[in-house]
Image (cartoon, helix red, strand yellow):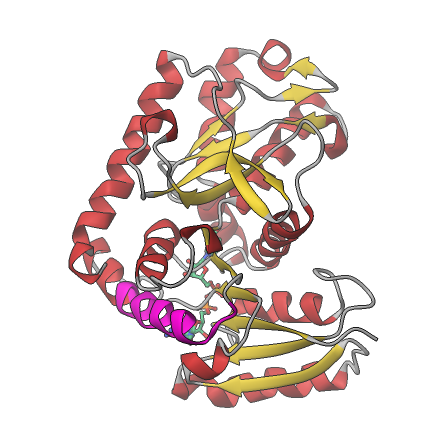
Amino acid sequence: MKSPVDIAVTGAAGQISYSLLFRLAAGDLLGPDQPIVLRLLEITPALDALNGVLMELNDCAYPLLHDVVVTDDPKTAFDHVDYAFLVGAKPRKQGMLRSDLLLQNAEIFQVQGKALNAAANRNVKVLVTGNPANTNALLAQRNAPDLAPSCFAAMSMLDHTRAISQLAAKCAVSIRDVSNVCVWGNHSCMQYPDLHHAKVKGIDALSLVGRDWFVDDFIPTVQHRGTEVIKARGASSAASAANAAIKHMSVWINGTDDGDWVSMAVPSDGSYGIAEGLVYSFPCRVVDGQYHIVESLEINAFSRERLRQNEAEVREEMLAIQHML
Ligand code: NAX
């Protein structure tokens, strides 16, 4: 048997983690012959609830689950981890300004960035899911100066899989027939799901679905899917978010399919005119565990404007927390 790999999950008593932890323990990320240690972080008042989740994990008798560490100390949670899922964040409460939400979450990700810097393995892969995900990832990354910026990403994979699913349904094809979809920008309602490069069975997707459906139906549906799920379910996306987190990390480890790419929010290298350093969702390919922004895609005026709006929003968020970078 291989030696166990340490995986940290924050917000471990929350609803996304309630799906994520069980899939990790079942081997959905690292496969059926890789034992894991789950290192679970929560705030102190949620530790009782987390102990309940621990009881359920134990009750599953997962052969791959070597150990579980439950803690409210970020350094203990990130000790020698190879993978970190930063899911925990403060929810937006009624009457709370977006700027307050940004600041309260900024404190969390500043502390966690420092703890990752001190304790995690140097090649750790850190995926930020907690919102506002792009800016939280930027904060964690900038507070971890000894880790390469490429150790960090924020999750736009749920937006990506939502976009694929909408396109496949419209064309009445299998998910496998869809490729080269991309979601650009911020994980917010501003995000830009783009079909200009997408293919369905190798055919240009826009020529199949038409521009009107793309602009009037597809884009707003993907942008507002999270709100629709809340309306229908009475709670925000959880299992689909956990699935996206596993898919993002899995692609980051194993690479993208030939010819295809995925959407990942990563520190910009200036590609497509997006200011260097901002965490922004781009089409990315992964080779040997390293993501690379797909270069030189043609961007028309329609797309360019949406890329610019997203950059402005991410920049505005960054300015609100700049003193903590
Ligand atoms: P929950 O409110 O169910 O769980 C969050 C958990 O985080 C709570 O148990 C809380 O105690 C914990 N927490 C708070 N501060 C913490 C800290 N400093 N350290 C450790 N844990 C802490 O939320 P859930 O539905 O699980 O969603 C988690 C986050 O994911 C939210 O910010 C949510 O907005 C975000 N989402 C992001 C998505 C994405 O695509 N990037 C999609 C799904 C989701 O909306």
Residues in magenta? 105-121
Q: Is residue 275 magenta?
A: no
Is 86 situated above or below 43? above
Q: Is residue 202 above or below residue 71?
A: above
In the image, 34: left or right of 141?
Answer: right
Depth order, front residue of 92/253: 253
Residue at 32 percent across and 34 percent down: it is 310
Percent across and percent down for residue 18 are 60, 71
Identify which residue, 212 or 272, lies in the foreground. 272
Decide whether the magenta segment is chiefly helix, strand or loop.
helix
Quadrant hosting ligand 1: bottom left
Q: Quadrant of the C terminus?
A: bottom left
**Residue at 60%, 33% in the rendered image:** 261
Which residue is painted at 69% across and 48% down in the image?
254
Looking at this view, is 52 or 134 the one in front? 134
Residue 116 position by quadrant: bottom left
Residue 154 x/y as whole percent: 45, 51
Give above or below for 131 relative to 19.
above
Looking at the image, which residue is at 24% across and 41% down? 315
Q: Is 117 included in the stretch rendered in magenta? A: yes
On the image, the x and y values in percent for residue 39 come to 56, 79
